[in-house]
Image: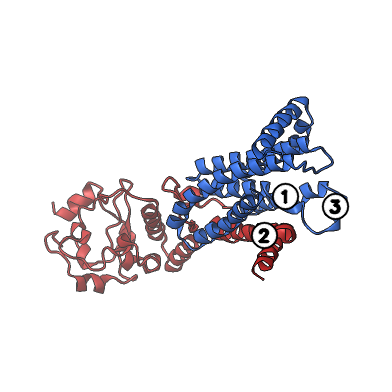
Chain colours: A red, B blue
Amino acid sequence: MSPASWAIFHGVVRVVPSAFVRAPHLSPTCSPRTVPSAATLKSSASPLNSPKVLALPCGALSASPPSAAFPAATSFFPSYPSANRFKTPSTKSPANKLFRPRAPRDKPDALAIYYLLLELVGALRKRRHAQHHAVESLWRYRPRVRTLPMDVLRPSHSVASATKPDHTRPNRQYDRYFFRGMSVLILGAVFLGFAKTYFWRASSEHRCRTG
Amino acid sequence: VIHIHGAAFTSWVLFLIVQTSLVSAGRVDVHRRLGMVGFGLAGVMVVLGAMAGTDLLRRDGTGFGVNAKAFYAGTLGDTFIFGTLILLAFRSRSNPAAHKRLILIATITLMEAAINRWPFAIIERAPFMIDVFAYTFLLLLAAYDLWLMRKMHRATIWGGLFLVVMQQLELPIGKTDVWQSFATWALERAKSIHGS
């Protein structure tokens, strides 16, 4: 049994047969040791010839390069490392583990689950414009995290609490204006009250003494 | 005593502007160092306020339609309120929101003496307007809290309540026999010190 057949038999990678298009790096004759080069991956990275591979419930990501199979899904997230992890495969790239895909070692965060969902939706859709529509809808209604000032956003705050509507205003800037304004107002009130009996009187007495 | 008292209280208001400006400029380190000087100044102000009040009692100074001994309760009461609020502000200096509010309310306590001397006829006609104008500063603080946080800060609520309740209790306390006898004792002590 070739490694590819072994992998398919054990359910590690499940390829949708109707959508399968022969790709060099997924060919049954392709040995795991013959790692596809970057040029090979790029040449096969077309939406037309990309294989449709489902993500498995065990958490294994799809075997096909997500940026190649679903460019609309991944081109929005250039800064997220796992979104473009197959673009430039090296010897340590997960592309070398095509036939034994594993879940990433690091703890999956909410964003990673979100990308996995995108891939899943894109893979389940047969038609390309439907894929685009699903991806765009998800992107349009993605959870948005408000940027809060550092004194409000403490480490204990989760993303969920940060997305709650915040009715308070960032107080530090307004506090500066308000308390300085109040102190000037108080000075004015004190001066208005004591000008005649204290401030001018003291200065006039000083003038009388010196004059 | 009165001139030193006036200089100290004027310094306090100027000091308040300097401190708020330092915080605005981001020099919190200087603000904290100067704050210890301000705390010392506040202690001196409490002593000078009590001395100025006793001196006013000796000169038979009156106000609000009450005798000098009852009015002495007002001057000493304001000094007590100011000292208490400053002490609370000092204790809560690690909580900037409460600290700045308590300092502001403590300064508002001292406003009645200045508002009493405003050259407006309405102040002379209706002495209760002194309280109205003084508490307008409190209302400004409360309105700012409501605008900023959709609720009033705890320091504003408790500090403001402490100020209003204590100030309204001052003259009724001053009219009691216990206070009148205490004021008589303080007057005799002041006269023996000054020799008049």
Depth check, mark 1 against mark 2: the one in front is 1
Give the number of the disc on residue B113. Answer: 1
Residues under numbered marks 3 and 1 in contact, where contact means CB atoms less than 8 Å apart? no
Q: What residue do we see at 35% from left, 67% from top? A: A78
Q: Which residue is labeled 2 in the image?
A: A185
Cα distance between the residues tagged 3 and 2: 22 Å
Mark 3: secondary structure: helix
Q: What residue do we see at 78% from left, 38% from top? A: B68
Q: What residue do we see at 34% from left, 71% from top? A: A48
Same chain for mark 3 and mark 2? The answer is no
* Res. A86 visible in picture: yes
Locate residue A161 relative to residue A73 in the image: left or right: right
Mark 1: secondary structure: helix
Amino acid type, label 2: Leu
Amino acid type, label 3: Glu
Mark 2: secondary structure: helix
Residue A196 screen position, x and y as percent: 74, 61
- On screen, residue B46 above or below A47: above
